[in-house]
Amino acid sequence: MKKYLINNAMIVPVDDERSPYFKGDLLVEGERIEKIVERPGVIEPDSDTEIIVGENLIVMPGLVNGHGHTAMTLFRSYADDMPLQEWLEEKIWPIEELLSADDIYWGTLLGIAEMIKGGTTTFTDMYFFMDQVAKAAVESGMKAVLSRGLVGLTDEDEKGLQETEEFINRWHGEERGRINVTIGPHAPYTCPPEYLKKVMALAEKTGRPLQIHLSETRKEVEDSLRQWGFSPPEQLYNMGFFDYPVIAAHCVHLMERDFYLLQEKNVGVIHNPGSNLKLGSGIASAAGMLKEGIRVGLGTDGAASNNNLDMIEEMRLAALISKGASEDPTLIDAAAAMKMATVNGAEILGLSETGSLREGYKADLVGLRCDRPHLIPMHDPVAHLVYAAQAADVELVIVDGQILLEKGELKTLDEEKIKAEAEKCAFRLREGIKKKR
Ligand code: NI
């Protein structure tokens, strides 16, 4: 069994049972954190323990990206500065029709490479050709929560349910639990009630949680009120959708009673501040949801609407926009932003042994260089991680005890090859769109 000792590091455990930060040692044995000591130089390494010098590192739990469409990296800067509906209908859906399995594979690997280099250890995906995504996740060593995106607007769409079930059977729990599968109905406005009932039957049968986009735009809520007389959360609540574990992305436009429904049914919300800002969708009340006792995690959404997959930036945005929108700088403090990006996300995704640095938990952790000018001096490492750190500071990434990034270099993936192949895919897609016109 491989053993690593990270010694003399600034440890930020994101664990309510410990101090927010301390200088100490952390021992990884096999896939788990064996020991954490709140004093440096106490753990004596034996001869087969590899030492990682922690002197200039802040060590924190790996970031958990709770919502995304990873292969959309191929559309980075393809369609910007447009409202959601127009962006989807005129730009994104037409180019998505051209995606091949090969594109998904390389686009996903590109996103994974970016995420690992930015300190993300778990990613969530809702897209198509999901076997390719699973394959990329397996190869990379990253932890994944995957779902095939489901839309229920045509008869064809029955196929998606069957494929989801097969996908669950094939992949859920693989790689010693590193690969997880959920069920991914896209949104209430693309999945009518009759279809959602079939989706719920599949959740009943397989026991897997549901992922859905919810109340992302004002238009979505107004259309729902006009068509059904209920807000999207009320509509789902009424049909019993929330009786299953639900991961709801966005929740930007909640009505007052929606807060109570989400809290009552323990729905996990993934806040995507970067994507919501860029698409002009609005600002979700993350502070309001937390205050009501709703669980809130963080996500990047796809790279076509963000345009990066940088969870450190997402933490900072979550904290800053809450303060700005409410004119209250005490809302979403650094510790709250940090929890959203780690332990809350892990819990919402149903991953029980990750999200905090805790003895016995899976060794999913990140080390950031803290001797660069923008991180000196360090009065408070938690504030540093949220308000001053950058993705480029990430130097070490470990998932399930395996090193994925060391001294800033990817250890499981060939970065140059991935970048070259992704460029080729993006070029083919661009040429394909020209022919379509
Ligand atoms: Ni999304």
Image (spheres, rainbow, N blue to C red):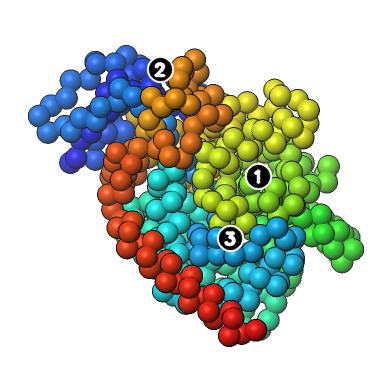
Left or right: residue 388 versus residue 422 is right
Q: Which mark is residue 421?
A: none
Q: Nearer the viewer, mark 3 or mark 2?
A: 3
Mark 2 residue type: Phe
Give, as a three-letter code, the residue at label 3. Answer: Ser
Q: Earlier in the sequence, mark 3 or mark 1?
A: 3
Element type at marker 3?
loop
What is the quadrant of residue 60 in the picture? Answer: top left
Looking at the image, which residue is at 44% across and 49% down? 115
Circle 1: element type: helix
Please tell me which residue is depicted at 58% across the width and 85% down the height of the picture: 435
On residue 22, the disc is 2
> Is residue 292 toward the left or the right of residue 268 in the image?
right
Q: Quadrant of residue 92?
A: bottom right
Q: Residue at x 36, y 17 (%)?
A: 23
Three-letter amino acid code at the position of disc 1: Pro
In the displayed image of the protein, which residue is found farthest to the left?
Answer: 47
Of the 4 image quadrants, the one containing the C terminus is bottom right
Which numbered mark, 3 or 1, is in the foreground of this view? 3
Taking depth in this image into account, of 371 and 135 the one nearest to the observer is 371
Q: Nearer the viewer, residue 145 or 84?
A: 84
Give the residue number, with chain letter if any, for mark 3: 77
Image side of residue 69 versus residue 214, left or right:
left
* Residue 306, horizontal then vertical, whole percent: 60, 52
Q: Which badge, 3 or 2, is on the more N-terminal residue?
A: 2
Q: Which mark is residue 273?
A: 1
Ligand 1 within 8 Å of disc 2? The answer is no
Q: Is mark 3 within 8 Å of ligand 1?
A: no
